[in-house]
Image: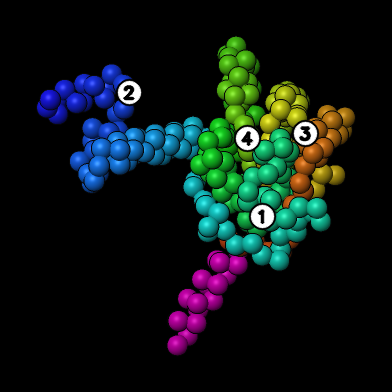
Amino acid sequence: MGVKNLKEICKTLHLSNITDRYEEIPYESKDQFLYDVLSLEVSSRQTNKIARLIKKAKFRELKWLKDYKWSEQIHLPTTTTKDEIIDLKFLLNKQNLLLLGASGTGKTHLSTALGLKACEKGYEVRFYRVADLVAQLEDALAKGTLQRLKRQIESCDLLILDEVGYVPFQKQGSELLFHIIADCYEQKSVIVTSNLEFGQWNRVFGDNRLTTALVDRLVHHAHIVAFTGESYRLQNALSSVNVAAATINK
């Protein structure tokens, strides 16, 4: 039959992963060999799909749950457990996850890690630093491509909005972001990280009524996690300085 003919058949059947690796499969029986070859194709397709989903999500950096440290500084709602968050039950129920606390306390790491796990489970995710999303929305509006951008966001299962509160928005930007969040309401899950309490969000959005409506949609069906304590980044920086100083003084 020949390798060339085998590749042509696999190409026709869209079994692109088999021709490169079928020689790795040991042969014990026809049934076993066929099963293992097809299992290899399924596994390779799943791996490729996850890689595509991760690339499409556009995470700023990759951070995993296995590397995440759950400390006493993380305060969960009394009705929510750590395992429920890790298992993405909020995503199954189209609920939101709001991570609130000072900068550097691990909010972005957790949101990214949960987004990556969602990709591994086959969900479509979009990750935005919220200031970047508002800038994209305003640019799309000016260019007449806003509906295209909104469709891209609507196609995802999980929307992650990082760093709400770091940059205040103009009226147009606030309204555009409000419509994105309103469209997500009870249709998909949203993870938000913010360094501000809800009562301070009007500083960012500039309109009390719009802020109230936005918070109302986010908080309904949401798990609110509070992060307290000092910044991990600051602690690590201070530790490094102390180690360096101790070394110099020896």
Residue under the image location 52 percent in, 51 percent down: 63
Q: Mark 3 is on which residue type?
A: Phe
Farthest-out residue, left:
2
Q: CA distance from mark 2 to mark 3?
A: 50 Å
Image spot of residue 40 (x, y percent): 34, 39
Q: Mark 1 is on which residue type?
A: Asp
Give the magenta range.
234-250
| Local crowd size for mark 2, using a 10 Å CA cut-off: few (<14), some (14–19), many (≥20) | few
Q: CA distance from mark 4 to mark 3?
A: 23 Å
Q: Mark 4 is on which residue type?
A: Leu
Query: What numbered label is drawn on residue 237?
Result: none
Farthest-out residue, top:
144
Q: CA distance from mark 3 to mark 1?
A: 33 Å
Farthest-out residue, bottom:
250
Q: CA distance from mark 1 to mark 4?
A: 18 Å
> Is 174 left or right of 18, judged from the image as shown?
right
| Residue 244 magenta-highlighted | yes
Q: CA distance from mark 2 to mark 4?
A: 30 Å
Query: What numbered label is drawn on residue 158?
Result: 4
Q: CA distance from mark 1 to mark 2?
A: 38 Å
Residue 180 in view, yes or no:
yes
Q: Mark 2 is on which residue type?
A: His
Mark 1 lies on residue:
83
